[in-house]
Amino acid sequence: MPDLITHLSISYFFNKPLKIFRYSTLFYCGAVLPDIATRAVSIPYHPAEFAVYPLHTPLGIVLLCLLLSFFFAEAERKQVFVSLIAGSSLHLFLDLFQKHLQPGYTLLFPFSWRAFEFGLLWPETIVSIVPLWILIVGVMELLNRRRAAQAKGNRQ
Amino acid sequence: MFSDNHRYIKITLLILILAVLCLYSFREGKRIYIDLGICLANADHFDGREIVVENYVYVSSVSKDRFAIEQEGSRIPVMGAPEELAPGDEIALRAIFHREGYLTLQEMHIKKLRTIKIIISLVAAMFVAGLFLIRYRFTLNGFQFVERT
């Protein structure tokens, strides 16, 4: 996995300018969900790694997002699901750019264990550019807020 | 599909399907992705075969032309130049297994910055949890999250 700051920053780049998702908080939650659901268990307790592995696969994450959406009000459930699944899909897509010695990600699990990844970067490589992500997101957020304040001022 | 009709049955079904997937993965994953413990326990079977050990592999000692690794309590020497390695480093490696109980190094990756990656990921996770809890609260009435007003 790239670190979660990288995942969050890239989901911010997608969400903020385009304003795709009404429930942006849930889009960001989706962007970290696959790692939260798996690494939060497998890092402190290594033997459970394969027990939680399905929650980092496309089918598993669809089922998990569907399950989570049932804990929201009926009226907004569909939007919640769409936001969570969009964030999670972006997460799984970004993970494919990583390189491992083992085969990679089993996109067709449980129907096939054949793994795939683009294999461009070692998972730890991106950590060194995290300060850059934080800077870019900070500047974008600042500009957005300034623009929103100006627009509000113009209306008044 | 998203309606409240049979909501608790849908929730139970989804939990059951996920549990079955997790159980299947737990059984099959260990068979497909081998670790040092499995290799050492079936030394004759893996003799001369190329293996990849990637998860939670730590360097336990380093000498001139070899080093030793440890994974989940299984320890094994590795023949190969320990360039830039230090005891305690987390690594991934591709190597040839020998039934005499050692590996010949083919390819290695040192997982530098992994601890930092975990720490900053933890910070990011807490940030998202904060964002979520600022916006939503859980209510037992309906057993669901609702937006804070």
Image (cartoon, coloured by chain):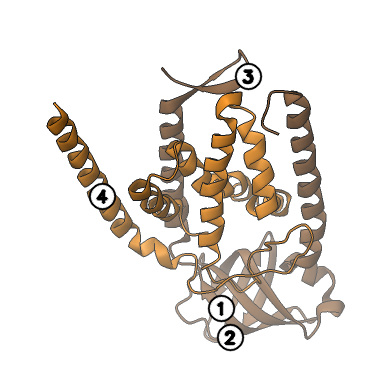
Chain colours: A orange, B brown
Q: Which residue is mark 4?
A: A140
Quadrant location, the C terminus of chain A = top left
Three-letter amino acid code of the residue under disc 3: Phe
Three-letter amino acid code of the residue under disc 2: Gly
Tell whether label 2 touches label 1 (CB within 8 Å).
Answer: yes
Rendered image: mark on residue B80: 2
Q: Nearer the viewer, mark 3 or mark 1?
A: 3
Q: CA distance from mark 4 to mark 1?
A: 39 Å
Q: Secondary structure at mark 1?
A: strand
Task: Determine whether B26 is above or below B45 in the image.
Answer: above
Q: CA distance from mark 3 to mark 4?
A: 37 Å
Three-letter amino acid code of the residue under disc 4: Met
Structural crowding at the residue carrying mark 3, measured as other residues with C-alpha within 10 Å and reported as few (<14), some (14–19) or many (≥20): few
Q: Residue furthest top?
A: B141
Q: Nearer the viewer, mark 4 or mark 1?
A: 4
Mark 1, chain letter? B
Among numbered discs 3 and 1, the one appearing first in the sequence: 1
Q: Secondary structure at mark 4?
A: helix
Q: Which residue is mark 1?
A: B108
Where residue A149 sits, quadrant-wise, is top left
Q: Which residue is mark 3?
A: B143
